[in-house]
Image (cartoon, rainbow, N blue to C red):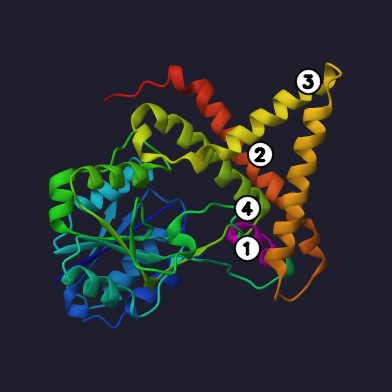
Amino acid sequence: MLVSVCVVAYNEEKVIGNLLNDIKNQDYPHDKIEILLIDSMSSDKTKQIMNEFKKKEMEFQNIQVLLNPKKKLAPGWNVALKNYNGDVIIRIDAHASIPKDFIRKNVEVLESGEFVSGGIRPNIIDENTPWKETLLLAEQSMFGSSIAPYRKGKKKTYVKSLFHGAYRREVFERVGLYNEQLGRTEDNEIHYRMRKAGFRLCYTPDIISYQHTRSTLKGMLKQKYGNGYWVALTLKACPGCLAVYHFVPLAFVMAIIITTVLAVAHIPIFSIIMWSLYWTIAVIMAVMSVRGKKKCWQQLLLPFLFFALHVSYGVGSLVGIIKLPFWKYKK
C-alpha cells in the first residue's frame, strides 16, 4: 500500500522537526510513503524546515510542501485530500510524536479488511519539570480531560472518533472533504459522516501515537476554552457527532451560576452541597493521579487545575451557546 502521511502546521518551528524525524525513522518501506506537509501561512521557520526536509530526504516516494491560505485546520486537511496519491492517508498533528512502527501497524489493520484505523494517544511533555509534569497529570486524568476511548482504551473495539487516524482512499471518496466551517470539531463531524456511510472506526491499542501537552497553563486553558466553544457551535452543524460528556463542563458552569444566585437569595444549601461534592471528588482524583508518581509540591495544585480546566471549557461552551443563534452556518 502507498501511504500518504499528512501534517498540517502553523508556527510549529519548535516541534515540527521532531515529528519529521519520527516519520523518517518509520520501519514501513520509505518508497511506499508519500509525505504531505501543509503550512498554514506560518510567520516563523515552519515552512523553511519543511522545504529543507523535502530537499534532504530523497528515499521517500514523494514529498509535497503545500500552502493552506485559510490557515484553519479543516481547510488544511482538505488541501491534503485534494493532493494525495496514496491508497491510504494518515492524519498526524504537528504537536505529535509517533514510534517507528506507527505506519506499519496501521497498514496491517487496514490490510486485514478495516477501512479506518487508529489507536491509543497518550499525552507527553517536552520537558520534565515539576510544573509541566503536574500539567500533564491534570491532562491525563479522567477528571481533568475526558473519557474518550482513544486516551486509555485497552481492547480492540469500534469507536465514534479517532486521533491520528489512517483511512483507505475509498472512505474520503465516499464522504467527501472536511467541513471548513468548523474549528476543533472537524474530526468529530467527519467521523460521524463516516459512520453514517457504513464505515467502522477500528481502535487498536497496539497502535500508539503521542500528543504533546500544552507547556503552559495559559495555553492549556486557551485550548480548553476553544474546545468548549466549538462543541457548542457544532450543535447547529452536527449535533449527532457530539456525546453527553462534551457538555459536562457547561453543566458545571451553569450549576455554579444557579447555586450562586440561590445563595445570594439566602438559599445556600445547594451551593454547599455542590461545592462539597466537587472538591471532595477533585481531591480524590488528584490523589489517584499522583499515586505511584514522584512527589512534588506542585501536585498540591491539581484540584485547582481541574477546576480551571472545567471552568475554561464550560465558559467556552456557554459563550458558544450564546452565539449559536447568530452563527451563520451554511448547510
> What range is drawn magenta here?
132-140
When asked about the image quadrant of residue 190, the answer is: top left
Prevailing secondary structure of the magenta residues: helix
Q: Are marks 2 and 4 in contact (CB under 8 Å)?
A: no
Q: Are marks 1 and 2 in contact (CB under 8 Å)?
A: no
The Cα atoms of the two marked residues, 3 and 4, are separated by: 27 Å
Q: Which mark is residue 262?
A: 3
Instruction: Please tell me how crowded label 3 is: few (under 14), some (14-19), or many (20+) other residues with Cα within 10 Å.
Output: some
**Amino acid under disc 3:** Leu
When asked about the image quadrant of residue 268, the answer is: top right
Assign a secondary structure to mark 1: helix
> Image point 37% across, 66% down: which residue?
119
Q: Which residue is mark 1?
A: 136
Quarter of the image with the C terminus is top left
Q: Residue 164 placed where, x, y %?
A: 36, 61
Q: Residue 252 placed where, x, y %?
A: 65, 35
In this view, the residue in front, 265 or 89, is 265
Assign a secondary structure to mark 3: helix
The Cα atoms of the two marked residues, 1 and 3, are separated by: 36 Å
Q: Earlier in the sequence, mark 1 or mark 2?
A: 1
Q: Which residue is mark 2?
A: 311
